[in-house]
Amino acid sequence: MTGAAARPAPRPGARNLVVGVGARRGAPLDEVLGLIEETLHRAGLRTADVVEVATVDVKADEPGIVGAAARLGVPVVTYPAAALAGVRVPNASDAAAGAVGTPSVAEAAALIEADELVVPKSVATGRAAVATCAVARRFPAVLTPFPVSGEKTSTPLVTEGPRPFTMAAMTPPTQNIESAGPDLRHHGDAEVRGENLTDLAVNVRTHTPPEWLRQRIAASLVSLAAYPDGTSARAAVAERHGLPVERVLLTAGAAEAFVLIARALPARCPVVVHPQFTEPEAALRAAGHGVGRVVLREEDGFRLDPAAVPDEADLVVVGNPTNPTSVLHPAALLERLARPGRTLVVDEAFMDVVPGEREALCGRTDIPGLVVLRSLTKTWGLAGLRIGYVLADPETVALLAEAQPLWPVSSPALAAAEACMEPRALVEAAEAADRITVDRAHLLAGLAEFSEVRAVEEARGPFVLVQLERAAEIRERLRLLGFAARRGDTFPGLGPQWLRLAVRDRATTNRFLQALDQAVQALPARTGR
């Protein structure tokens, strides 16, 4: 059985223990089983609470491991060494890394789809070191209705209970973000940093910023001795959207806007619609909020049903088009989420990639509680400069501005913002959106040739979400062939079988499709149980 295979549902009251096991070739059943039982006993845990035995895929047919799992009445779940190598473990071993490809089979296998390490890697006293064992606990989601005036609601949210120490706490900067499963602070740039790879993991348009924009940014450097003044850039953004300047707030990228919203706006029952960009939930959690999740379903095409959002939610965050699904929600549908007393945050970071910006809400002033976020990072290649903005009613803008530090946006970023609002820039952005539409269709057509790949066909952003078995292995093979793809398992609502691919020009896409074909063909037949 593999990590992507179906698992039995958690037993009522079970603590959902996952036992990770590493073993030398030929490790006897009695020693592997004895080690597991002894490890559980020393920790005061019950074998009845074990739901699976996990190990590396090359050990899938090891009789001692298979037999021990059979005695415990649970399945064996296996993972590729490359996937396990990406799990941070407290007791790494160079010997294990050299022999198997992961620094601790037992700890990594236990933790890869669990939440808390209960028992670190151990070897039973008095036994030869033929096997290692570690135990982790998996926390199931809890259905928690929001109270309304003491009454129960009929629409519960999937939320997460309080967590003790998790492995996410070992890896800054997530040490203060209890992410309730996926690493909410993992972003695509981690896939390519320091590597000479063709970048399909980050959604920034290639060959940007253009030369004219570089020149405008460079010209602003002569004024670095003066404190930044955002007056002109703010007015330019307001004019571009036909809004009063009081409805505009400039920010150090959309990421700062999420932090300001989490810290400055009142929210008793915030809800994030997933799968989507994880920074909004991370910011809310960091600000001390409990966060409800509305998880859209693959079988529904990741389309939003407004009825799925509970009436009690007083802050709702949704992307449009949504990262990573690339689905564009109709504006009329999003309007149905708005109501008095609720803040509706719509992340339109990729809306300028949609031809005509259809379904945009950025210029609307008639929707109560609407907060729209925009970013100049993606289209103009300004990720390193950090520039974005918020469009909202003046009262909300004032609250967010009070939470900002002094001079939050640098002079070069302000110069870039003003330049990107000019007519020639808007024409260039529109032309880029048309090219991306054609290039995306070419990518989708190429992916359709693979029986192993299923793409979200309703893609409208500069990226495509795809599902394929053994995606982690394919992703590693793509890296060896020179391509970086964005893993999908850090997005709530997705899992290890998903990858996100940035849309690139036809020549790059053709090279990628050839590499994908090689990666798929090179996979050995599955031998796990």
Image (tube, grey):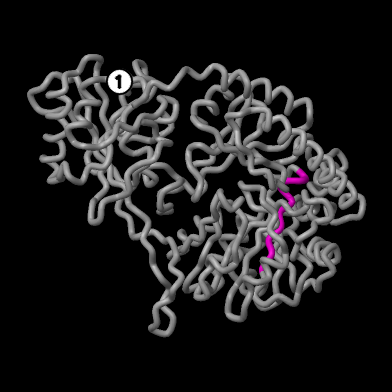
Above or below, comparing residue 470 to residue 328 in the picture: above
How many numbered callouts? 1
Q: Residue at x 77, y 55 (%)?
A: 414
- Image coordinates of residue 149 in percent, x first then y, are 42, 85
Say whether residue 323 is left or right of residue 15: right
Q: Is residue 52 above or below residue 295?
A: above
Quarter of the image where one finds residue 498? top right
SS class, disc 1: loop
Residue at 56 percent across and 69 percent down: it is: 307
Residue 328 on the magenta span: no
The quadrant of the rendering that contains the C terminus is top left
Q: Residue furthest left?
A: 126
Identify the residue position indicated by label 1 in the image. Answer: 61
The answer to if 379 sits in the magenta stretch is yes
Tell me if residue 49 comes above or below residue 288 in the rendering.
Answer: above
Position of 256 compared to 286: left or right?
right
Residue ranking furthest to the bottom: 149
Q: Residues within 10 Å of mark 1 (few under 14, many from 20)?
A: some
**Residue situated in front as seen by the camera: 335 or 398:** 335
Q: Which residue lies furthest to the right in this view?
A: 424
Task: Identify the amino acid type marked 1.
Answer: Asp
In the rendered view, tell whether residue 516 sits above or below residue 40.
Answer: above
User: Would residue 453 be found to the left or right of residue 10 on screen?
Assistant: right
Looking at the picture, how far across and down is residue 309, in whole percent?
54, 67
Front-most of residues 219 and 210? 210
- At 63% from the left and 21% from the top, the residue drawn is 517
Quadrant housing residue 45 = top left
Is residue 60 visible to the viewer in this orientation of the structure?
yes
* Residue depicted at 57% across the width and 22% down the height: 520
Boundaries of the magenta span: 371-380
Residue 487, position in %: x, y? 54, 37
